[in-house]
Image (cartoon, helix red, strand yellow):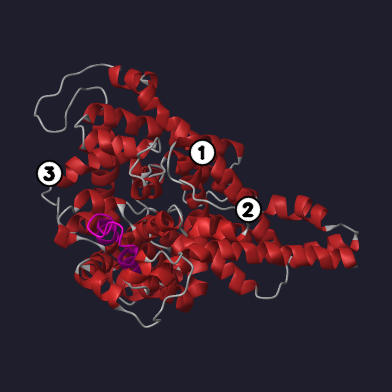
Amino acid sequence: MSGKVLLRTLVYVSLVLACAVVLLPLLAVFLTSLKTSQEMSRGSGALSLPHDWLNYHNYVTAFRAGKMLRAFWNTAFILVFSIGGTVLIGSMAAFAIDRFHFRLRRLVIALFLIGSLVPSVTTQVATFKIVNNFGLFDSRWAPIVLYMGTDIVSIYIFLQFIRGIPVSLDEAARIDGANTWTIYWRIILPLLKPAIATVVIIKGITVYNDFYIPFLYMPSENLGTISTSLFRFKGPFGAHWEDISAGAILVMVPTLVVFLFLQRFIYNGFTRGATK
Amino acid sequence: MTRARVWRTVTPWLYLAVPLALLITFTYLPVGNMIRDSFTDWDGVSPDRNYVGTRNYVELFTRPELFQVFFVSVYYLVASVAQIVLALYFATVLSFDLRFRNLFKGILFFPYLLNGVAIGLVFLYFFQPHGTLDTVLSGFGVHGHHFWLGSGRMANTSLSAVSVWRYMGLNFVLFLGAIQSIPGELYEASELDGANRWQQFRHIIAPGIKPVLSLSAILAISGSLSAFEIPFIMTGGAAGTQTFVIQTVKLAFEFNKMGLASAAAVALLVIILLVTWLQRIVVPDERNDLV
Protein backbone atom coordinates (compact mmCIF):
# COMPACT_ATOMS: atom_id res chain seq x y z
CA MET A 1 0.00 0.00 0.00
CA SER A 2 2.73 2.45 0.92
CA GLY A 3 4.41 1.68 -2.43
CA LYS A 4 1.29 2.89 -4.16
CA VAL A 5 1.24 6.09 -2.12
CA LEU A 6 4.90 6.69 -2.92
CA LEU A 7 4.26 6.16 -6.62
CA ARG A 8 1.36 8.56 -6.52
CA THR A 9 3.48 11.16 -4.77
CA LEU A 10 6.22 10.79 -7.35
CA VAL A 11 3.69 11.28 -10.11
CA TYR A 12 2.46 14.49 -8.52
CA VAL A 13 6.01 15.70 -8.01
CA SER A 14 6.80 15.12 -11.68
CA LEU A 15 3.65 16.98 -12.74
CA VAL A 16 4.34 19.94 -10.49
CA LEU A 17 7.92 20.04 -11.72
CA ALA A 18 6.79 20.03 -15.35
CA CYS A 19 4.34 22.85 -14.66
CA ALA A 20 7.12 24.83 -13.02
CA VAL A 21 9.27 24.36 -16.10
CA VAL A 22 6.41 25.62 -18.27
CA LEU A 23 5.45 28.56 -16.08
CA LEU A 24 8.77 29.83 -14.75
CA PRO A 25 10.07 31.42 -17.98
CA LEU A 26 6.67 33.06 -18.50
CA LEU A 27 6.50 34.27 -14.90
CA ALA A 28 9.96 35.86 -15.19
CA VAL A 29 8.87 37.80 -18.25
CA PHE A 30 5.63 38.87 -16.61
CA LEU A 31 7.44 40.13 -13.50
CA THR A 32 9.98 41.95 -15.64
CA SER A 33 7.28 43.66 -17.68
CA LEU A 34 6.15 45.46 -14.51
CA LYS A 35 9.56 46.75 -13.48
CA THR A 36 11.01 50.18 -14.12
CA SER A 37 14.30 50.61 -15.94
CA GLN A 38 15.91 51.68 -12.64
CA GLU A 39 14.80 48.44 -11.03
CA MET A 40 16.25 46.57 -13.99
CA SER A 41 19.61 48.33 -13.86
CA ARG A 42 19.93 47.56 -10.17
CA GLY A 43 20.05 43.95 -11.32
CA SER A 44 17.62 42.64 -8.74
CA GLY A 45 17.32 39.25 -10.42
CA ALA A 46 14.77 38.06 -12.91
CA LEU A 47 12.42 36.49 -10.38
CA SER A 48 12.35 39.32 -7.86
CA LEU A 49 8.99 41.00 -7.46
CA PRO A 50 8.34 44.35 -9.08
CA HIS A 51 8.19 47.40 -6.85
CA ASP A 52 4.87 48.56 -8.19
CA TRP A 53 2.45 45.89 -9.40
CA LEU A 54 0.47 48.45 -11.36
CA ASN A 55 3.37 49.90 -13.31
CA TYR A 56 1.95 49.82 -16.83
CA HIS A 57 4.52 52.15 -18.40
CA ASN A 58 6.34 49.46 -20.30
CA TYR A 59 3.06 48.46 -21.89
CA VAL A 60 2.49 52.02 -23.02
CA THR A 61 5.99 52.06 -24.51
CA ALA A 62 5.38 48.75 -26.25
CA PHE A 63 2.14 50.07 -27.73
CA ARG A 64 3.55 53.44 -28.80
CA ALA A 65 7.16 52.82 -29.79
CA GLY A 66 6.63 49.18 -30.68
CA LYS A 67 3.65 50.00 -32.92
CA MET A 68 1.67 47.16 -31.40
CA LEU A 69 -1.72 48.71 -32.08
CA ARG A 70 -0.96 48.79 -35.78
CA ALA A 71 0.30 45.21 -35.50
CA PHE A 72 -2.89 43.98 -33.87
CA TRP A 73 -4.93 45.71 -36.55
CA ASN A 74 -2.90 44.14 -39.38
CA THR A 75 -3.14 40.72 -37.79
CA ALA A 76 -6.89 41.09 -37.31
CA PHE A 77 -7.31 42.11 -40.94
CA ILE A 78 -5.34 39.11 -42.16
CA LEU A 79 -7.17 36.81 -39.74
CA VAL A 80 -10.66 37.82 -40.86
CA PHE A 81 -10.00 37.45 -44.56
CA SER A 82 -7.88 34.33 -44.46
CA ILE A 83 -10.23 32.50 -42.10
CA GLY A 84 -13.32 33.52 -44.06
CA GLY A 85 -11.63 32.47 -47.28
CA THR A 86 -10.44 29.17 -45.87
CA VAL A 87 -13.91 28.26 -44.65
CA LEU A 88 -15.52 29.05 -48.01
CA ILE A 89 -12.82 27.44 -50.13
CA GLY A 90 -12.47 24.36 -47.97
CA SER A 91 -16.19 23.71 -47.67
CA MET A 92 -16.79 24.27 -51.39
CA ALA A 93 -14.00 21.88 -52.34
CA ALA A 94 -15.31 19.28 -49.90
CA PHE A 95 -18.87 19.78 -51.21
CA ALA A 96 -17.76 19.23 -54.80
CA ILE A 97 -15.66 16.18 -53.95
CA ASP A 98 -18.25 14.48 -51.79
CA ARG A 99 -21.54 15.35 -53.49
CA PHE A 100 -20.72 15.09 -57.18
CA HIS A 101 -19.56 12.31 -59.40
CA PHE A 102 -17.48 13.65 -62.22
CA ARG A 103 -14.61 12.61 -64.43
CA LEU A 104 -11.15 13.21 -62.97
CA ARG A 105 -12.59 13.18 -59.46
CA ARG A 106 -9.89 10.78 -58.37
CA LEU A 107 -7.22 12.96 -59.92
CA VAL A 108 -8.52 15.98 -58.02
CA ILE A 109 -8.47 14.01 -54.77
CA ALA A 110 -4.93 12.83 -55.48
CA LEU A 111 -3.83 16.41 -56.19
CA PHE A 112 -5.06 17.58 -52.79
CA LEU A 113 -3.68 14.50 -51.07
CA ILE A 114 -0.18 14.86 -52.49
CA GLY A 115 -0.31 18.62 -52.02
CA SER A 116 -0.92 18.14 -48.33
CA LEU A 117 2.39 16.31 -48.02
CA VAL A 118 4.43 19.26 -49.29
CA PRO A 119 5.54 21.32 -46.29
CA SER A 120 5.25 24.97 -47.18
CA VAL A 121 8.55 25.88 -45.48
CA THR A 122 10.35 24.10 -48.26
CA THR A 123 8.62 25.84 -51.14
CA GLN A 124 8.80 29.47 -50.01
CA VAL A 125 11.93 30.03 -52.06
CA ALA A 126 9.90 29.55 -55.24
CA THR A 127 6.55 30.77 -53.91
CA PHE A 128 8.19 34.12 -53.27
CA LYS A 129 8.68 34.78 -56.99
CA ILE A 130 5.10 33.81 -57.77
CA VAL A 131 3.70 36.12 -55.10
CA ASN A 132 5.95 38.82 -56.43
CA ASN A 133 4.73 38.29 -59.99
CA PHE A 134 1.15 38.81 -58.83
CA GLY A 135 2.27 42.15 -57.40
CA LEU A 136 1.26 41.03 -53.92
CA PHE A 137 4.67 41.44 -52.33
CA ASP A 138 4.63 43.76 -49.34
CA SER A 139 0.86 43.80 -49.06
CA ARG A 140 -1.48 42.17 -46.60
CA TRP A 141 -3.00 40.16 -49.43
CA ALA A 142 0.14 38.05 -49.81
CA PRO A 143 -0.29 36.21 -46.49
CA ILE A 144 -4.07 36.12 -46.92
CA VAL A 145 -3.81 34.37 -50.27
CA LEU A 146 -1.11 32.01 -49.00
CA TYR A 147 -3.03 31.06 -45.88
CA MET A 148 -6.14 30.38 -47.95
CA GLY A 149 -4.39 28.57 -50.75
CA THR A 150 -2.14 26.19 -48.88
CA ASP A 151 -4.52 24.87 -46.28
CA ILE A 152 -5.47 21.36 -47.23
CA VAL A 153 -6.06 20.20 -43.67
CA SER A 154 -9.30 22.18 -43.53
CA ILE A 155 -10.54 20.52 -46.69
CA TYR A 156 -10.01 17.18 -44.93
CA ILE A 157 -11.88 18.34 -41.87
CA PHE A 158 -14.83 19.57 -43.96
CA LEU A 159 -14.81 16.38 -45.97
CA GLN A 160 -15.09 14.25 -42.86
CA PHE A 161 -18.05 16.27 -41.63
CA ILE A 162 -19.82 16.52 -44.95
CA ARG A 163 -19.86 12.71 -45.16
CA GLY A 164 -21.92 12.64 -42.00
CA ILE A 165 -24.62 14.84 -43.53
CA PRO A 166 -27.22 12.55 -45.13
CA VAL A 167 -27.52 12.92 -48.90
CA SER A 168 -31.29 12.59 -48.52
CA LEU A 169 -31.31 16.18 -47.29
CA ASP A 170 -29.83 17.35 -50.59
CA GLU A 171 -32.30 15.22 -52.51
CA ALA A 172 -35.29 16.53 -50.60
CA ALA A 173 -34.15 20.08 -51.31
CA ARG A 174 -33.57 19.30 -54.97
CA ILE A 175 -37.10 17.97 -55.29
CA ASP A 176 -38.31 21.24 -53.80
CA GLY A 177 -36.49 22.97 -56.66
CA ALA A 178 -33.28 24.05 -54.96
CA ASN A 179 -30.17 24.36 -57.13
CA THR A 180 -26.74 23.21 -55.95
CA TRP A 181 -25.78 26.65 -54.68
CA THR A 182 -28.88 26.80 -52.49
CA ILE A 183 -28.10 23.30 -51.22
CA TYR A 184 -24.54 24.30 -50.41
CA TRP A 185 -25.39 27.66 -48.89
CA ARG A 186 -28.66 26.86 -47.09
CA ILE A 187 -28.22 23.21 -46.08
CA ILE A 188 -24.61 22.05 -46.10
CA LEU A 189 -22.86 25.14 -44.79
CA PRO A 190 -25.14 25.63 -41.77
CA LEU A 191 -24.78 21.95 -40.87
CA LEU A 192 -21.01 22.25 -41.08
CA LYS A 193 -20.93 24.56 -38.04
CA PRO A 194 -18.88 22.20 -35.83
CA ALA A 195 -16.34 21.76 -38.61
CA ILE A 196 -16.26 25.51 -39.18
CA ALA A 197 -15.60 26.06 -35.48
CA THR A 198 -12.69 23.62 -35.64
CA VAL A 199 -11.21 25.26 -38.72
CA VAL A 200 -11.65 28.77 -37.32
CA ILE A 201 -9.83 27.84 -34.12
CA ILE A 202 -6.91 25.99 -35.69
CA LYS A 203 -6.53 28.49 -38.48
CA GLY A 204 -6.95 31.43 -36.14
CA ILE A 205 -4.21 30.30 -33.81
CA THR A 206 -1.88 29.33 -36.64
CA VAL A 207 -2.31 32.64 -38.45
CA TYR A 208 -2.06 34.68 -35.26
CA ASN A 209 1.24 32.99 -34.42
CA ASP A 210 2.78 32.77 -37.86
CA PHE A 211 6.07 34.52 -38.30
CA TYR A 212 7.67 33.10 -41.42
CA ILE A 213 5.17 34.32 -44.01
CA PRO A 214 4.70 37.90 -42.79
CA PHE A 215 8.46 38.11 -42.26
CA LEU A 216 9.16 37.11 -45.85
CA TYR A 217 6.32 38.91 -47.59
CA MET A 218 5.67 42.08 -45.60
CA PRO A 219 8.94 43.80 -44.75
CA SER A 220 7.40 47.28 -44.44
CA GLU A 221 7.28 48.47 -40.89
CA ASN A 222 3.67 49.64 -41.04
CA LEU A 223 2.63 46.21 -42.32
CA GLY A 224 3.95 44.49 -39.22
CA THR A 225 1.83 41.70 -37.74
CA ILE A 226 2.11 40.95 -34.05
CA SER A 227 4.86 38.42 -34.78
CA THR A 228 7.00 40.61 -36.99
CA SER A 229 6.44 43.74 -34.89
CA LEU A 230 7.43 41.87 -31.77
CA PHE A 231 10.47 40.54 -33.58
CA ARG A 232 11.51 44.13 -34.31
CA PHE A 233 11.58 44.80 -30.55
CA LYS A 234 14.92 43.01 -30.55
CA GLY A 235 16.71 45.89 -32.26
CA PRO A 236 15.70 49.31 -30.90
CA PHE A 237 14.89 48.16 -27.38
CA GLY A 238 18.24 46.40 -27.21
CA ALA A 239 18.79 45.46 -23.62
CA HIS A 240 15.56 47.05 -22.38
CA TRP A 241 14.10 43.77 -21.28
CA GLU A 242 11.26 45.46 -19.39
CA ASP A 243 9.88 46.80 -22.71
CA ILE A 244 10.51 43.59 -24.64
CA SER A 245 8.79 41.64 -21.86
CA ALA A 246 5.76 43.91 -22.00
CA GLY A 247 5.55 43.33 -25.76
CA ALA A 248 5.77 39.56 -25.34
CA ILE A 249 3.09 39.57 -22.65
CA LEU A 250 0.82 41.71 -24.84
CA VAL A 251 1.07 39.12 -27.57
CA MET A 252 0.47 36.17 -25.26
CA VAL A 253 -2.49 37.50 -23.29
CA PRO A 254 -5.06 37.13 -26.12
CA THR A 255 -3.95 33.52 -26.55
CA LEU A 256 -4.44 32.86 -22.85
CA VAL A 257 -7.91 34.42 -22.89
CA VAL A 258 -8.98 32.43 -25.95
CA PHE A 259 -7.58 29.25 -24.41
CA LEU A 260 -9.41 29.76 -21.12
CA PHE A 261 -12.74 30.29 -22.86
CA LEU A 262 -12.48 27.74 -25.65
CA GLN A 263 -10.41 24.98 -24.03
CA ARG A 264 -12.59 22.10 -25.03
CA PHE A 265 -12.86 23.20 -28.66
CA ILE A 266 -9.15 23.82 -28.86
CA TYR A 267 -8.20 20.33 -27.67
CA ASN A 268 -10.67 18.73 -30.06
CA GLY A 269 -9.66 20.99 -32.91
CA PHE A 270 -5.97 20.26 -32.68
CA THR A 271 -6.48 16.55 -32.20
CA ARG A 272 -8.68 16.47 -35.28
CA GLY A 273 -6.43 18.74 -37.31
CA ALA A 274 -3.23 16.88 -36.60
CA THR A 275 -4.45 13.32 -36.98
CA LYS A 276 -5.92 14.09 -40.35
CA MET B 1 -31.73 18.18 -72.17
CA THR B 2 -28.16 18.61 -73.40
CA ARG B 3 -27.99 21.97 -71.71
CA ALA B 4 -28.88 20.34 -68.44
CA ARG B 5 -26.13 17.80 -69.01
CA VAL B 6 -23.50 20.39 -69.75
CA TRP B 7 -24.60 22.22 -66.64
CA ARG B 8 -24.28 19.08 -64.57
CA THR B 9 -20.74 18.44 -65.85
CA VAL B 10 -19.67 21.98 -65.19
CA THR B 11 -21.16 22.45 -61.71
CA PRO B 12 -18.55 20.55 -59.63
CA TRP B 13 -15.78 22.44 -61.41
CA LEU B 14 -17.37 25.74 -60.45
CA TYR B 15 -16.96 24.80 -56.80
CA LEU B 16 -13.47 23.44 -57.37
CA ALA B 17 -12.16 26.29 -59.53
CA VAL B 18 -10.84 28.52 -56.75
CA PRO B 19 -9.45 25.77 -54.48
CA LEU B 20 -7.73 24.07 -57.40
CA ALA B 21 -6.35 27.31 -58.79
CA LEU B 22 -4.87 28.17 -55.40
CA LEU B 23 -3.53 24.65 -54.92
CA ILE B 24 -1.79 24.67 -58.25
CA THR B 25 -0.49 28.23 -57.99
CA PHE B 26 0.88 27.99 -54.48
CA THR B 27 1.86 24.34 -54.15
CA TYR B 28 2.49 22.68 -57.49
CA LEU B 29 3.86 25.64 -59.41
CA PRO B 30 6.45 26.45 -56.72
CA VAL B 31 7.54 22.83 -56.53
CA GLY B 32 7.91 22.75 -60.32
CA ASN B 33 9.83 26.03 -60.44
CA MET B 34 12.00 24.94 -57.58
CA ILE B 35 13.01 21.73 -59.29
CA ARG B 36 13.76 23.63 -62.49
CA ASP B 37 15.81 26.33 -60.73
CA SER B 38 17.76 23.78 -58.72
CA PHE B 39 19.58 22.76 -61.89
CA THR B 40 20.57 26.33 -62.77
CA ASP B 41 22.88 29.03 -61.45
CA TRP B 42 20.07 31.59 -61.26
CA ASP B 43 20.63 34.49 -58.88
CA GLY B 44 16.92 35.19 -58.46
CA VAL B 45 17.07 38.60 -60.13
CA SER B 46 18.60 38.49 -63.60
CA PRO B 47 16.50 37.24 -66.51
CA ASP B 48 19.03 34.65 -67.66
CA ARG B 49 19.81 31.40 -65.97
CA ASN B 50 22.27 28.75 -67.07
CA TYR B 51 21.79 25.06 -66.79
CA VAL B 52 24.48 23.63 -64.53
CA GLY B 53 23.35 20.05 -64.13
CA THR B 54 23.58 18.58 -60.65
CA ARG B 55 26.31 20.97 -59.50
CA ASN B 56 24.10 22.57 -56.83
CA TYR B 57 23.23 19.22 -55.33
CA VAL B 58 26.86 18.11 -55.28
CA GLU B 59 27.84 21.38 -53.62
CA LEU B 60 25.09 20.99 -51.04
CA PHE B 61 26.23 17.58 -49.90
CA THR B 62 29.98 18.06 -50.17
CA ARG B 63 30.74 21.57 -48.93
CA PRO B 64 31.26 21.04 -45.19
CA GLU B 65 29.88 24.45 -44.16
CA LEU B 66 26.67 23.72 -46.06
CA PHE B 67 26.42 20.18 -44.79
CA GLN B 68 26.88 21.38 -41.20
CA VAL B 69 23.13 22.08 -40.91
CA PHE B 70 22.37 18.38 -40.90
CA PHE B 71 24.40 18.00 -37.72
CA VAL B 72 22.36 20.78 -36.15
CA SER B 73 19.16 18.94 -36.95
CA VAL B 74 20.47 15.95 -35.01
CA TYR B 75 20.10 18.05 -31.84
CA TYR B 76 16.45 18.69 -32.67
CA LEU B 77 15.91 15.05 -33.53
CA VAL B 78 17.29 13.88 -30.21
CA ALA B 79 15.21 16.54 -28.48
CA SER B 80 12.07 15.39 -30.22
CA VAL B 81 12.64 11.82 -29.06
CA ALA B 82 12.83 13.17 -25.51
CA GLN B 83 9.72 15.19 -26.28
CA ILE B 84 7.75 12.15 -27.38
CA VAL B 85 8.85 10.14 -24.34
CA LEU B 86 7.85 12.97 -22.00
CA ALA B 87 4.53 13.42 -23.77
CA LEU B 88 3.85 9.70 -23.53
CA TYR B 89 4.62 9.71 -19.83
CA PHE B 90 2.40 12.68 -19.03
CA ALA B 91 -0.42 11.40 -21.22
CA THR B 92 -0.35 8.01 -19.51
CA VAL B 93 -0.21 9.54 -16.06
CA LEU B 94 -2.99 12.00 -16.74
CA SER B 95 -5.26 9.42 -18.32
CA PHE B 96 -5.83 8.10 -14.81
CA ASP B 97 -7.98 9.93 -12.37
CA LEU B 98 -5.87 12.56 -10.66
CA ARG B 99 -6.57 15.72 -8.75
CA PHE B 100 -6.20 18.93 -10.77
CA ARG B 101 -6.06 16.84 -13.93
CA ASN B 102 -7.49 19.55 -16.16
CA LEU B 103 -5.21 22.18 -14.69
CA PHE B 104 -2.13 20.05 -15.39
CA LYS B 105 -3.38 19.26 -18.86
CA GLY B 106 -3.98 22.92 -19.61
CA ILE B 107 -0.59 24.07 -18.36
CA LEU B 108 1.30 21.36 -20.24
CA PHE B 109 -0.53 22.12 -23.48
CA PHE B 110 -0.54 25.92 -23.30
CA PRO B 111 2.98 26.57 -24.69
CA TYR B 112 1.95 24.99 -27.98
CA LEU B 113 -0.58 27.78 -28.52
CA LEU B 114 1.85 30.61 -27.88
CA ASN B 115 3.35 32.89 -30.47
CA GLY B 116 6.78 31.71 -31.61
CA VAL B 117 8.38 35.15 -31.48
CA ALA B 118 7.10 35.67 -27.95
CA ILE B 119 8.53 32.26 -26.97
CA GLY B 120 11.85 33.16 -28.56
CA LEU B 121 12.06 36.39 -26.59
CA VAL B 122 10.91 34.73 -23.37
CA PHE B 123 13.74 32.24 -23.62
CA LEU B 124 16.28 34.76 -24.78
CA TYR B 125 15.58 36.41 -21.45
CA PHE B 126 15.48 33.10 -19.63
CA PHE B 127 18.95 32.15 -20.87
CA GLN B 128 20.60 35.54 -20.23
CA PRO B 129 23.77 35.34 -18.17
CA HIS B 130 22.57 36.04 -14.62
CA GLY B 131 19.05 35.59 -16.01
CA THR B 132 16.17 33.43 -14.88
CA LEU B 133 17.86 30.09 -15.40
CA ASP B 134 21.03 31.11 -13.58
CA THR B 135 18.93 32.56 -10.75
CA VAL B 136 16.99 29.34 -10.38
CA LEU B 137 20.16 27.25 -10.54
CA SER B 138 21.82 29.32 -7.84
CA GLY B 139 18.83 28.49 -5.68
CA PHE B 140 19.97 24.89 -6.02
CA GLY B 141 23.55 25.78 -5.22
CA VAL B 142 24.85 26.04 -8.79
CA HIS B 143 26.33 29.52 -8.82
CA GLY B 144 27.87 31.69 -11.49
CA HIS B 145 26.59 32.55 -14.90
CA HIS B 146 26.57 30.47 -18.03
CA PHE B 147 26.50 31.39 -21.69
CA TRP B 148 23.57 29.16 -22.52
CA LEU B 149 23.39 30.50 -26.05
CA GLY B 150 27.11 31.09 -26.34
CA SER B 151 28.37 28.54 -28.79
CA GLY B 152 27.78 25.37 -30.74
CA ARG B 153 26.89 22.55 -28.43
CA MET B 154 25.50 24.56 -25.56
CA ALA B 155 23.50 26.85 -27.84
CA ASN B 156 22.01 24.05 -29.90
CA THR B 157 21.11 22.12 -26.78
CA SER B 158 19.38 25.16 -25.28
CA LEU B 159 17.53 25.89 -28.52
CA SER B 160 16.31 22.34 -28.95
CA ALA B 161 15.21 22.33 -25.30
CA VAL B 162 13.08 25.37 -26.11
CA SER B 163 11.53 23.47 -28.96
CA VAL B 164 10.65 20.63 -26.57
CA TRP B 165 9.08 23.21 -24.26
CA ARG B 166 7.06 24.55 -27.15
CA TYR B 167 5.88 21.41 -28.92
CA MET B 168 5.57 18.77 -26.19
CA GLY B 169 2.00 19.85 -25.47
CA LEU B 170 0.72 18.85 -28.89
CA ASN B 171 2.17 15.34 -28.66
CA PHE B 172 0.84 15.08 -25.14
CA VAL B 173 -2.72 16.05 -26.08
CA LEU B 174 -2.69 13.74 -29.10
CA PHE B 175 -1.53 10.82 -26.97
CA LEU B 176 -4.02 11.64 -24.25
CA GLY B 177 -6.86 11.73 -26.78
CA ALA B 178 -5.83 8.37 -28.17
CA ILE B 179 -5.52 6.81 -24.72
CA GLN B 180 -8.88 8.13 -23.63
CA SER B 181 -10.58 6.72 -26.69
CA ILE B 182 -9.59 3.21 -25.54
CA PRO B 183 -12.73 1.67 -24.02
CA GLY B 184 -12.61 1.54 -20.22
CA GLU B 185 -13.78 -2.08 -20.10
CA LEU B 186 -10.39 -3.15 -21.43
CA TYR B 187 -8.68 -1.82 -18.33
CA GLU B 188 -11.26 -3.38 -16.05
CA ALA B 189 -10.95 -6.74 -17.76
CA SER B 190 -7.17 -6.61 -17.55
CA GLU B 191 -7.34 -5.68 -13.89
CA LEU B 192 -9.52 -8.73 -13.26
CA ASP B 193 -6.86 -10.77 -15.01
CA GLY B 194 -4.31 -9.32 -12.61
CA ALA B 195 -2.40 -7.05 -15.00
CA ASN B 196 -0.23 -4.35 -13.46
CA ARG B 197 0.17 -0.78 -14.71
CA TRP B 198 3.14 -1.61 -16.91
CA GLN B 199 1.34 -4.56 -18.50
CA GLN B 200 -1.66 -2.33 -19.08
CA PHE B 201 0.58 0.18 -20.80
CA ARG B 202 2.37 -2.42 -22.85
CA HIS B 203 -0.67 -4.37 -24.04
CA ILE B 204 -3.57 -1.92 -24.03
CA ILE B 205 -2.28 1.64 -24.26
CA ALA B 206 0.68 1.09 -26.60
CA PRO B 207 -1.32 -0.62 -29.40
CA GLY B 208 -4.10 1.96 -29.00
CA ILE B 209 -1.83 4.89 -29.65
CA LYS B 210 0.25 3.34 -32.42
CA PRO B 211 -1.19 5.50 -35.25
CA VAL B 212 -0.69 8.70 -33.26
CA LEU B 213 2.78 7.58 -32.25
CA SER B 214 3.83 7.04 -35.85
CA LEU B 215 2.33 10.40 -36.79
CA SER B 216 4.38 12.01 -34.03
CA ALA B 217 7.45 10.28 -35.36
CA ILE B 218 7.11 11.86 -38.81
CA LEU B 219 6.26 15.21 -37.31
CA ALA B 220 9.40 14.87 -35.20
CA ILE B 221 11.64 14.08 -38.14
CA SER B 222 10.23 16.66 -40.52
CA GLY B 223 10.04 19.16 -37.68
CA SER B 224 13.68 18.75 -36.73
CA LEU B 225 14.80 19.08 -40.33
CA SER B 226 12.70 22.18 -40.87
CA ALA B 227 13.38 23.85 -37.51
CA PHE B 228 13.34 27.57 -38.14
CA GLU B 229 11.47 29.94 -35.88
CA ILE B 230 13.11 29.36 -32.52
CA PRO B 231 16.75 29.43 -33.70
CA PHE B 232 16.08 32.26 -36.18
CA ILE B 233 14.43 34.45 -33.58
CA MET B 234 16.83 33.68 -30.76
CA THR B 235 20.25 33.51 -32.38
CA GLY B 236 19.62 34.24 -36.05
CA GLY B 237 21.63 31.15 -36.87
CA ALA B 238 24.82 32.54 -35.29
CA ALA B 239 27.33 30.49 -33.30
CA GLY B 240 26.80 27.28 -35.23
CA THR B 241 23.03 27.16 -34.70
CA GLN B 242 22.11 27.57 -38.35
CA THR B 243 19.42 25.11 -39.39
CA PHE B 244 18.53 23.86 -42.83
CA VAL B 245 15.69 26.34 -43.35
CA ILE B 246 17.65 29.32 -42.02
CA GLN B 247 20.45 28.47 -44.40
CA THR B 248 18.08 28.09 -47.33
CA VAL B 249 16.39 31.43 -46.61
CA LYS B 250 19.78 33.12 -46.34
CA LEU B 251 21.05 31.55 -49.55
CA ALA B 252 17.96 32.66 -51.42
CA PHE B 253 17.27 36.11 -50.07
CA GLU B 254 20.60 37.32 -48.70
CA PHE B 255 23.18 35.80 -51.00
CA ASN B 256 20.99 35.60 -54.12
CA LYS B 257 21.95 32.00 -54.74
CA MET B 258 18.55 30.93 -55.95
CA GLY B 259 19.85 27.82 -57.70
CA LEU B 260 21.60 26.50 -54.63
CA ALA B 261 18.70 27.46 -52.35
CA SER B 262 16.27 25.65 -54.64
CA ALA B 263 18.43 22.55 -54.57
CA ALA B 264 18.45 22.71 -50.77
CA ALA B 265 14.68 23.10 -50.65
CA VAL B 266 14.18 20.21 -53.09
CA ALA B 267 16.49 18.02 -51.00
CA LEU B 268 14.50 18.83 -47.87
CA LEU B 269 11.23 18.17 -49.66
CA VAL B 270 12.45 14.81 -50.94
CA ILE B 271 13.66 13.76 -47.48
CA ILE B 272 10.34 14.70 -45.89
CA LEU B 273 8.30 12.94 -48.58
CA LEU B 274 10.50 9.89 -48.16
CA VAL B 275 9.94 9.81 -44.42
CA THR B 276 6.19 10.19 -44.88
CA TRP B 277 6.16 7.43 -47.44
CA LEU B 278 8.17 5.12 -45.18
CA GLN B 279 5.73 5.78 -42.37
CA ARG B 280 2.80 4.87 -44.63
CA ILE B 281 4.50 1.57 -45.40
CA VAL B 282 5.44 0.75 -41.84
CA VAL B 283 2.08 1.78 -40.39
CA PRO B 284 -0.60 1.43 -43.05
CA ASP B 285 -3.41 3.91 -42.62
CA GLU B 286 -6.59 1.92 -42.14
CA ARG B 287 -8.68 5.03 -42.27
CA ASN B 288 -7.79 6.04 -45.78
CA ASP B 289 -11.11 7.77 -46.11
CA LEU B 290 -10.47 10.38 -48.75
CA VAL B 291 -10.88 8.04 -51.69
The residue tagged 2 is B86
Q: Is residue A171 left or right of residue B281?
A: left
Q: Residues within 10 Å of mark 1 (few under 14, many from 20)?
A: some
Amino acid carrying label 3: it is Asn
Residue range corresponding to the magenta coloring? A227-249
Distance between mark 2 and mark 3 Cα atoms: 46 Å
Q: Quadrant of the N terminus of chain B?
A: bottom left
- Sort mark 3 into few (<14), some (14-19) or many (20+) by Cα contacts within 10 Å: few
Label 3: state its secondary structure. helix
Q: Position of residue A275 (x, y in %)?
A: 52, 54
Which residue is most to the left?
Answer: B47
Eye-nearest disc, 2 or 3: 2
Which quadrant holds residue A33?
Answer: bottom left
Q: Reading the chain from its start, which is encountered first: label 1 or label 2?
A: 1
Q: Is residue B96 left or right of residue A157?
A: right
Most extreme residue toward the bottom, as rendered? A54
Residue type at mark 2 is Leu
Q: Position of residue B156 (x, y in %)?
A: 47, 41
- The residue wearing badge 1 is B75
The Cα–Cα distance between marks 1 and 2, rounded to whole angstroms, is 17 Å
Residue B12 visible in the shown view: no
Closer to us: A46 or A118: A46
Which residue, given by chain and number where applicable, does mark 3 sit on?
Answer: A133
- A228 in the magenta segment: yes
Across and down, in percent, residue A81 comes to 24, 66
